[in-house]
Amino acid sequence: MTPSVATARAGSNIAFVKYWGNLNHELRIPMNNSLSMTLDQAYTTTTVTFSNDYAQDSLHLNGSPAGEAATQRAADHLAILRQLAGRQEKAKIVSKNSFPTGAGIASSASGFAALTVAAAGALGLDLPQQTLSRLARRGSGSASRSIDGGFVEWVQGSSDESSYARPLAPADHWDLVDVIAIISTGHKHVGSTGGHAAASSSPFFQARLGELATTLPQVREALLQRDLPRFGELIEAEAISLHVMAMTSKPGILYWQPGSLEVVHALYEWRRTGEAIGYFTFDAGPNVHIITEQKYAAAVVERLRAMPSVLDVLKCDVGGPARLIDSHLE
Ligand code: DP6
């Protein structure tokens, strides 16, 4: 039988209101809605080939065989898609990120979105966005938000069927930019899956959920109104709230590095003097994501590049949806 192959490309996303903590760990039903923008220049390309010739699922990531845990996680995800398609063949997965893996740029988001779309394509499943989002969620919660492009909201839901992301506004709604200051490219000590499991042990967990009932609609409104100062103030507070929770959970997790805080303080100063405008947020990692508008981006990039603690700067515009592409990875 000829192998079934497909390749997909999916952008990562940066959350403005973040996913942290699960109602159901296995199904990745979150404790709150989250809201993000899909990124253009930070993406994963993944080719999936199903064939009876393979004895087991394999994963090649950025040119090398992936470790056991990552391979198992991908294989578990494929099992869900295989079951849906009523197929048995094992698969070879070849995947490549356009950015450093495990450094606070959500590689699991773009990774599982690309894997879902590629595997569905290779299995001949023609699925609506909502179903793809639900499936991607099973691999990594934030991946549910990388199926659609533009600005996206993952609706918490209460079951596998009702927890998925939906578009909030198209990519051309607002020319926001995520300027990522890369502080470290090493792997983090505690991944986000461990963070979600520990989240509810923070004494601030319930307080944060209570606060989100008010702040999430405010973030959504500021985004729809393209009100940068209001939006910026809200997302900075939200990022701090998430990291305070991580720091105070048991075990505590401190993702920030000295360089992360140097960037935050520099940003405060640039805003005060009017040199450069932008607002920070963080994923579960040390890199600083500076959210700004296109007209301010060059000034932010230039200043970040001059800072010794910033290893690299990646400018990402708002990206489009995950999609199948024609050229396969070897
Ligand atoms: C802080 O989606 O990476 O980036 O489902 O365990 O893979 P898993 O977690 P993941 O968590 C993302 C955490 C975050 C916030 C966010 O992107 O919403």
Image (tube, grey):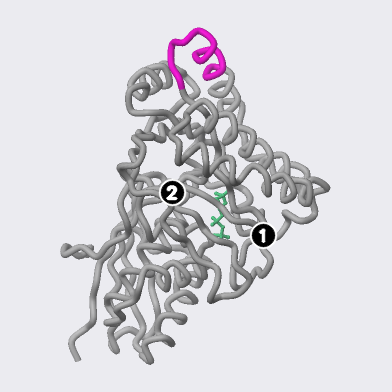
In percent of width and height, residue 192 lies at 60, 54
Residue 236: percent from the left, percent from the top? Answer: 59, 32
Assess whether mark 2 and mark 1 are in contact (beta carbons under 8 angstroms): no
Q: Residue reaching furthest right?
A: 203
| The image quarter in which residue 255 lies | top right
Left or right: 117, with 79 as reference point: left
Q: Nearer the viewer, mark 1 or mark 2?
A: 1
Which quadrant of the render holds ligand 1? bottom right
Residue 268 x, y percent position in the rendering: 56, 17
Disc 1 marks a residue whose amino acid type is: Met
Q: Is mark 2 within 8 Å of ligand 1?
A: yes
Hey, what amino acid is under mark 2? Asn
| Residue 74: numbered disc | none
Q: Helix, strand, or loop for circle 2?
A: strand
Percent x, y of residue 114: 35, 63
Asked if residue 273 is among those painted magenta in the image, a careful observer would answer: yes
Q: Is residue 278 above or below residue 100?
A: above
For disc 2, the marked residue is 13
Disc nearer the start of the sequence (1/2): 2
- Which residue is tagged 1? 31
Position of 205 compared to 18: left or right? right
